[in-house]
Amino acid sequence: MDEHERTEAEDIVRAIRHGEVDAFVVTESDEDRIYSLRSADVLYRAMIEQMKDGAVALGSTGLIVYCNAYFAQLVKAERRALIGTKILPLVPAEPDGDGFFESLGDPARNGTTREIELRTTDGTTVPVMAVMNRIDVDRDNHVYCLIVTDLTEQKRREQLLIEGRRKDEFLAMLAHELRNPIAPIRYAAARLRAKDLTPEKSEWARNVIDRQVDHLTRLIEDLLDVSRITRGRISLHLEPVEIDAILSRAVEAARPLIEARKQDLTISQPGKRLRVNGDATRLAQVVSNLLNNASKFTRDGGRLGVGVEVEAGAPSWVRIIVSDDGAGIDPAALPNLFNLFVQADSTPGRAQGGLGIGLTLVRSFVEMHGGTVTGASDGLGRGSRFTVRLPLLADAAEREAGAGDPQRGAAVTVHPRRILVVEDSQDVAESLSAWLEDDGHQVRVARTGAEALSEARTFRPEVMLVDIGLPDMSGHELAPKLRELPEVRDALLVAVTGYGQEGERRRSRAAGFDHHLIKPLTFENLSELLTSLDRGRAT
């Protein structure tokens, strides 16, 4: 080795020793060997850099000493920022409590693969297939070599296949359900054409046709509702509605099936007036769908129940519980019970029929009202329970102090506040302002996001009611800008929208809103909101 080659080898050793290059640990005592490996190292590094898999070299404590560009891209980080940091924040804890390296890096399990999710720097996850091998440098030193393969596209294809199968099953069920009424209608029509037609036979045939047409109509309406919901084209007519009125309409709709099967229905309600802000037709449809399901999957002569309970809290909630002692639900089916194109097959041969979209509609309508719905069962043959939770309006007795307007009674005295109404509809803004001013509040109106920012600086509102649909920017875009203003940093920021699904509420919270109110606003909503300022920040 000449002097130039020896100097170059010494430079490589020095760079490795001081961490100035990304490289694996090599034996430093034999300079000739280091130099001879130099060309091979360049080749290996080039190969690793071109891989379409993530490659990471790790010290025994989990320190990242090298990673290729593809791994950095997977976890959405700069490679320089990853070198010298721990791998653990990027990998999940093992379910059995063992560490990541103890399980995958054990010499006895070299080459073992495991499907995991990598955590990225922006909080998302990436599904990968991981394989880790321990490389012994010498008797006392070793490093880990981690290779991860991105499974995102594979998972997407698998999900498409699953959805395709569900759609195929749904279309098969739809064809089956549409054919079912055809046979009795055709037979009834034939009876009406018979020469020996009597008034009794004629009435029987008409009743059969009426029942089957009603059944077809319900199927078509359910299909249309699902289509409207998935396209975001369905709207609610919200107003204060009595819970007992909802139950009456629901029971009336479900009663023919319940009576035909000679089932015993028990209804229990608290002895006081309960109201929610909702669409009476859709809420009755929710309860009647649950009752119809309970009846279909319960034997003739079985027991059904509808119970109403008040859940304490601020704001208060009401629970509507539909129960039965029927076929029950397999625990494995519970997590996907409300998904579209999924049906828990709790009876042999699906003898009770149905498209399996009723529970999807139930969940959609309940979430549009700002509520939740859950299903529970102790197992097959042990009945089921479905619980609908809805935000409860203040009791009527607590609103007696309202002057003249039956919707204007307030349960508590509300301190005057400075309130900024951000609403582009002139009629809505003016009526809401008049409503608030009648209760002694100071109100200003902004019609755009830009006006809202200007008014917020000068007016310094304590409460801001922000419509999500503004002409120049969305309420979700406006909220962070308002939060940046020192004049209103501690103000109560309220989203006002026509959408009440949990996804929309999460989006409002992420934008910086403290509260999420559904249009049309009622005095009860605003009263609860404003009194919350005296109790503490609304949640």
Image (cartoon, rainbow, N blue to C red):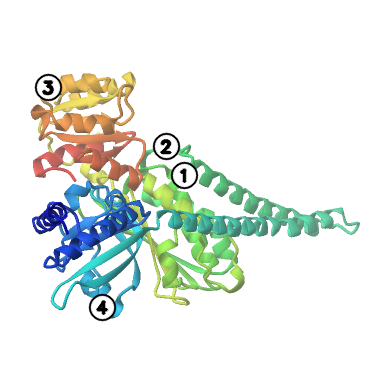
Residue 140 sits in quarter: bottom left
Q: Answer whether labels 2 and 1 touch (C-beta < 8 Å).
A: yes
Residue carrying label 2: 237
Q: Amino acid at mark 1?
A: Thr
- Cβ–Cβ under 8 Å for marks 4 and 3: no
* Residues marked 4 and 2 touching at CB (< 8 Å): no
Q: Residues within 10 Å of mark 1 (few under 14, many from 20)?
A: few
Which of the two marks, 4 or 2, is nearer to us in this view? 4
Q: Reading the chain from its start, which is encountered first: label 4 or label 2?
A: 4
Tell me the amino acid under the disc marked 2: His
Q: Is residue 153 visible?
A: yes
Residue at the extreme front of the image, as rendered: 2
Q: Determine which residue is flagged by label 3.
A: 457
Residue at image x 12%, y 37%?
A: 413
Q: Position of residue 215 (x, y in %)?
A: 63, 54
**Residue at coordinates 45% horizontally, 46% vertically from top-left?**
282
Q: What is the number of the mark on residue 281? A: 1
Q: Position of residue 416 (x, y in %)?
A: 11, 29
**Whole-number angstrom distance, CA of label 2 to CA of label 3:** 36 Å
User: In whole angstroms, how far apart are the C-alphas of marks 2 and 1?
Assistant: 9 Å
Between 107 and 535, which is closer to the camera in this rendering?
107
Tell me if 195 is positioned left or right of 151 in this view: right
Disc 2 + disc 3, Cβ < 8 Å: no
Q: Is residue 21 above or below residue 474?
A: below
Distance between the Cα atoms at labels 4 and 1? 65 Å
